[in-house]
Amino acid sequence: LFGGAMSIGYCLWQTGAASWLAIHWLTMFESAPGWVFVVGIAFFVLVMTNLIMNVAAIAISMPVALVIAPYLDVAPHLVVFASLVTAGMPFLLLVGAAPNAIAYASGQFTSKEFFVCGVPASILLMVVTAIFVVVVWPLMGMPCTMDDLKDREDAAAIEEVELEAVEPSTDVASPAIPAQEPEPLADWLDLTATSCESTVYQPFDGTCLESP
């Protein structure tokens, strides 16, 4: 099963068909809003990950997507995260992931039933991904546009300069602390115990222990 999927991916990669598909699919969104472009990339990865291995789907689509994204004012963070989400959820075909084949080995359903149930699951996945791209990730502080990314980098540079100005210089040598000689043991344990009769030693609290 996975040998066939790897063979398909290898053929698509070596013949250039995968790059051709990625380029022609993604260039369809060159005049679309940024979030539509990101969702389009996620959908392409979702389709490819059901046909070939998810790692191959990412390797095919990411180089093209990351080149087009800056021209549409889309931060690469959105492209990468949206693609990774859909790459790990192949709900249509059994060759998409190992858990699909493991579940199919139970004999509780057929490949047709798996595909039929995977269609609404894939649609729901795209809807949730679009919500995260438009609403959730921007609220969490993820840069969505190239301007946001530039502002984030500028703020980090300013903060670094301020920290360097506030922190004291570490070049000045700190004054050496003279080493202290340890106090002799006789200062802690008075072995003479001259003030007590028939004593063995005098502990820290000053009491005397009598010998039996």
Image (tube, rainbow, N blue to C red):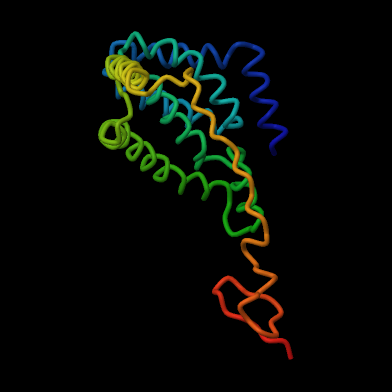
Front residue of 115 and 72: 72
Image quarter where the N terminus lies is top right
Q: Position of residue 187 (x, y in %)?
A: 62, 61
Residue placed at 66% from the left, 31% from the top?
5
x and y, in percent, of residue 184 in the image: 67, 55
Outermost residue toward the top in this view: 71
In which quadrant of the rendered view does residue 54 lie? top right
Residue sitting at x 50%, y 22%: 173
x, y percent for residue 163:
35, 22
- Looking at the image, the residue that sits furthest to the bottom is 212
Q: Where 23 sits versus 52, above or below?
A: above
Q: Quadrant of residue 107?
A: bottom right
Q: Is residue 109 left or right of residue 184?
A: left
Q: For the C terminus, give its image quadrant.
A: bottom right
Question: In this rendering, does residue 149 appear at all?
Answer: no
211 versus 60 height, above or below: below
Residue 192 appears in view: yes
- Residue 45 vs 209, above or below: the answer is above
Percent position (x, y) of residue 55? 59, 29
Residue at (55%, 26%) from the top-left corner? 57
Left or right: 105 as drawn, with respect to 38:
right
